[in-house]
């Protein structure tokens, strides 16, 4: 009974208020805990004594039985996995196949559709009567089945007699036209006939009727040109600067070097001057100066390249030019585009000659005659050759690292083939007719001039020493510039001094006066090479022969510095009076306009005296000869500018890249205080921008980013085609800005003169006060005293102390 007390409880009669306790005959109530929920609750009460006794007596037996059952061991069940047996067919599958129902008729297919405007709307179902609502049910009508149609065996044939016909033709003999001419003398009226015709009524009536219409026609011809093509003028007006419908740059193609796993950035981009659809880019490792010094050993094992990309193969470069170090800038030779000069980060200049690989990179078909215009192949015809492997080309010559620049070369230019200079900076006529000199600037505060022709040595070297210094040239490297390899030195250097201090300006970009060079076409360069030998193979010694000087040549040029300064200086040297050494002239003008390093300084392709400079967060436009300041200076941009370039077809448009991957398109005819259009190109910094004119209907813009991707964008019609008078309008805008600067300068001088005059007058007044005589001072004191007495008299009159009728003076009254 000890266990049973856990399941029921005796309660005193006086403690229970659940129902009428006085009706229960006993003293204790039995509260039973029902753990199995036999009656639906946790607890239940037994309301009679009889039921309580029966529950207590009967509950003992099952408990004993349960205790007894606990000691009886149960048989444990052991799991036996089934054993697979081979299946034996007893014919049941045939019965299943015979009893199965198979479809003998073709199923009908129905298509249920709804309106496009109702797609996605909520569906509501409702009951309706199919007979009362139109289109509530679909009737499946019978239709003829081709499988059960009996073909008709009868055939109706009709016949008709037709007369026999015959087609004949004839042609007259064509005679060749011939040009024939004849000359005759005009028949003139006599004097009597002239008088008779002049007095005839028919002529007078004709002149009276026609005179009015002739006068109207003559007036109309004076007012407007009757032969003007109105449709052509209308198309030009739609494409002018006021039309904003099409200003979006569309991406045409992109190039990425997938074979090089090293993270590199693009430092310079240049379109090939004569081969359309070919573009060259120089790449450099994305490392800071400290990291470059730290990983210098690993960088020596990696090639420094210039990649040639073609529209025909956006994955594999056509050529790879090797260099001793990463190239920061390079330029094609204007007279021979197969010769390339580049500036390295270590300060050396590298020369390549890719004439032997010209057939490999030419993807242009000019046709049978040379007079045909060069056209680019369509993209679907320019299929890359799977067997063609990328070719590495070694450089022909590299400059001496001891005598050249000490830091990175930031800009390089070829001098024109019309002139050359000597070590004094004097300009002479270039009789060779080819570009032989270069100019470079570097971060070591120097501007160097180089000559690719062999120089005559002042002291002849012994033959034995020459044999020791000779280096074997590989068979695949042309010997065009072998005389320059490792011994090339600049013939003159320029340092831009800051004046009183010993420091120098650090140039980053330069802009010469003759930047608009003439590039020969592909047909011309081929014709010259086939007729005559390559002029660069037989270079004569320069600067030694007597040449004709050019006196009226402008030797001044623009320079941009790391501090954001724009310098206008001269490359001519002058001798110091004390030491006799050659020294650079002082800068003509120096302006501090930009708030960062100047990375773009370029002359306009339409106006040779207009220069665009970009640096830091702003842009400036200059006019050569105007010394008062820039014609246009923009406000600070939201992001730093990194590159820029003039448009090749519109004189008032230029493109600027930013560090956030956006490009600003400036249109001076539309806005002069902010960009006319801004567009996102990439997610990283834009490092270089250069446009290219392919045809009148298609122009491209190459944009390079910091991650090494080259984007080729197609320039829209609005930004590539100028309006009718755009050149004159932009010229008028620049002239107006020049007049405005002159007016501002004139007003500044007037204000300064007025300020000086006011200061002189103040000084004169001070001097006059000290230079007065004794008599003048006494007279002034007397006048002041009389004015005081007069004021005192008026005060007394107002107070009534003195009468107005009193004619005596106030002095007599006193």
Image: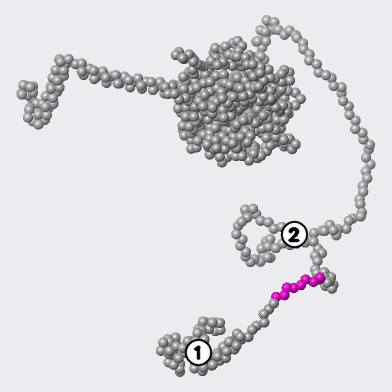
Q: In which quarter of the image is the C terminus?
A: top left
**Between 456 and 564, which is closer to the camera in this rendering?**
456
Q: What element carries label 2?
A: loop
Q: Residue furthest top?
A: 191
What is the quadrant of residue 189 in the picture? top right
Residue drawn at (50%, 16%) of the image: 582
Q: Is residue 261 magenta?
A: no
| Image position of 156 (left or right of 717) | right
What is the quadrant of residue 295 in the picture? top right
**Residue 769: x and y, percent?**
21, 19
Q: Is residue 54 above or below residue 625?
A: below
| Image position of 775 (left or right of 423) | left
**Between 17 and 525, which is closer to the camera in this rendering?**
525
Q: Can residue 578 be seen in this view?
A: yes
Sequence-earlier tag: 1 or 2: 1
Q: Residue furthest front?
A: 464
Q: Is residue 253 above or below residue 151?
A: above
Q: Is mark 1 on a helix, strand or loop?
A: strand
Q: Mark 1 points at which residue?
A: 46
**Tag in front: 1 or 2:** 1
Residue segment shown in magenta: 79-87
Q: In this view, does 219 lie above or below 293?
A: above
**Residue 539: x and y, percent?**
66, 17
Q: Does the magenta stretch include residue 85?
A: yes
Residue drawn at (58%, 13%) of the image: 428
Q: Name the residue under label 2.
A: 109
Q: How crowded is mark 1: few (under 14 residues within 10 Å), some or many (20 or more)?
A: some
């Amino acid at each position: 009974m000890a266990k049973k007390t856990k399941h029921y409880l005796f309660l005193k009669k006086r403690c229970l208020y659940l129902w009428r306790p006085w009706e229960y005959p006993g003293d204790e109530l039995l509260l039973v805990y029902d753990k199995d929920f036999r009656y639906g609750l946790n607890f239940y009460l037994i309301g009679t004594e009889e039921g309580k006794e029966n529950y207590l007596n009967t509950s003992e037996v099952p408990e004993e039985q349960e205790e007894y059952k606990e000691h009886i061991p149960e048989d444990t069940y052991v799991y036996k996995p089934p054993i697979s047996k081979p299946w034996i067919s007893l014919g049941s599958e045939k019965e299943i196949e015979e009893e199965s129902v198979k479809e003998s008729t073709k199923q009908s297919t129905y298509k249920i559709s709804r309106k496009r405007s109702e797609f996605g709307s909520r569906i509501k179902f409702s009951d309706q009567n199919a007979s009362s609502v139109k289109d509530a049910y679909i009737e499946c009508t019978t239709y003829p089945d081709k499988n059960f149609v009996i073909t008709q065996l009868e055939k109706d044939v009709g016949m008709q007699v037709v007369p026999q016909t015959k087609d004949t033709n004839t042609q007259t003999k064509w005679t060749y036209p011939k040009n024939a001419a004849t000359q005759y003398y005009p028949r003139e009226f006599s004097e009597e006939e002239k008088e008779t015709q002049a007095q005839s009524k028919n002529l007078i009536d004709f002149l009276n009727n026609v005179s009015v219409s002739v006068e109207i026609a003559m007036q109309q011809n004076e007012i407007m040109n009757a032969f003007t093509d109105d449709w052509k003028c209308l198309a030009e007006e739609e494409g002018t600067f006021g039309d904003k419908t099409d200003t979006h740059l569309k991406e045409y193609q992109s190039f990425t070097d997938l074979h090089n796993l090293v993270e590199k950035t693009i430092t310079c981009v240049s379109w090939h001057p004569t081969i359309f659809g070919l573009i060259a880019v120089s790449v450099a490792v994305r490392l800071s100066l400290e990291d470059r010094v730290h990983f210098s050993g690993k960088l020596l094992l990696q090639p420094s390249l210039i990649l040639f990309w073609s529209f025909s193969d956006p994955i594999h470069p056509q050529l790879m030019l090797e260099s001793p170090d990463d190239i920061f800038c390079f330029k094609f030779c204007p007279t021979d585009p197969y010769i390339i000069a580049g500036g390295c980060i270590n300060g050396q200049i590298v020369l390549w000659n890719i004439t032997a690989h010209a057939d490999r990179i030419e993807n242009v078909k000019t046709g049978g005659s040379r007079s045909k215009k060069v056209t680019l192949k369509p993209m679907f015809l320019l299929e890359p050759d799977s067997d063609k492997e990328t070719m590495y080309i070694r450089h022909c010559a590299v400059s001496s690292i001891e005598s050249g620049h000490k830091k990175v070369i930031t800009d390089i230019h070829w001098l024109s083939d019309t002139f050359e200079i000597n070590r004094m900076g004097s300009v002479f006529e270039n009789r060779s007719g080819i570009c032989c000199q270069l100019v470079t600037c570097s971060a070591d505060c120097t501007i160097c001039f180089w000559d690719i022709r062999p120089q005559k040595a002042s002291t002849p070297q012994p033959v034995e020493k020459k044999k020791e210094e000779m280096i074997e040239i590989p068979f695949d490297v042309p010997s065009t510039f072998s005389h320059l390899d490792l011994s090339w030195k600049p013939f003159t250097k320029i340092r831009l001094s800051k004046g009183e201090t010993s420091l120098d300006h650090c140039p980053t970009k330069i802009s010469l006066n003759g930047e608009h060079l003439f590039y020969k076409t592909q047909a011309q360069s081929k014709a010259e090479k086939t007729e005559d030998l390559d002029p660069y193979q037989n270079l004569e010694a320069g600067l030694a022969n007597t040449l004709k000087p050019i006196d009226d040549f402008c030797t001044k040029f623009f320079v941009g510095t790391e501090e954001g300064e724009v310098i206008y200086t001269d490359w001519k040297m002058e001798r110091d009076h004390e030491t006799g050494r050659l020294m650079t002239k002082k800068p003509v003008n120096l302006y501090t306009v930009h708030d960062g390093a100047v990375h773009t300084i370029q002359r306009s392709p339409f106006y040779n005296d207009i220069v665009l400079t970009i640096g830091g967060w702003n842009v400036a436009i200059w006019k050569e000869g105007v010394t008062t300041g820039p014609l246009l200076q923009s406000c600070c941009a939201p992001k730093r500018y990194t590159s820029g370039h003039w448009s090749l077809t519109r004189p008032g448009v230029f493109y600027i890249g930013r560090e956030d991957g956006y490009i600003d398109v400036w249109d001076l005819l539309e806005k002069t205080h902010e960009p006319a259009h801004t567009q996102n190109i990439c997610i990283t910094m834009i490092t270089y921008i250069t446009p290219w004119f392919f045809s009148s209907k298609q122009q491209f813009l190459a944009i390079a980013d910091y991650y090494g991707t080259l984007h080729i964008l197609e320039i829209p019609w609005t930004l590539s085609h100028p309006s009718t008078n755009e050149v004159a309008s932009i010229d008028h805008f620049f002239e107006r800005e020049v007049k405005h600067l002159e007016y501002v300068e004139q007003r500044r001088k007037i204000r300064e003169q007025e300020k000086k005059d006011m200061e002189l007058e103040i000084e004169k007044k001070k001097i006059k006060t000290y230079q007065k005589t004794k008599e003048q001072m006494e007279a002034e004191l007397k006048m002041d005293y009389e004015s005081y007495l007069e004021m005192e008299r008026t005060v007394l009159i107002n107070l009534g102390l003195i009468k107005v009728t009193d004619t005596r003076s106030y002095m007599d009254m006193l």
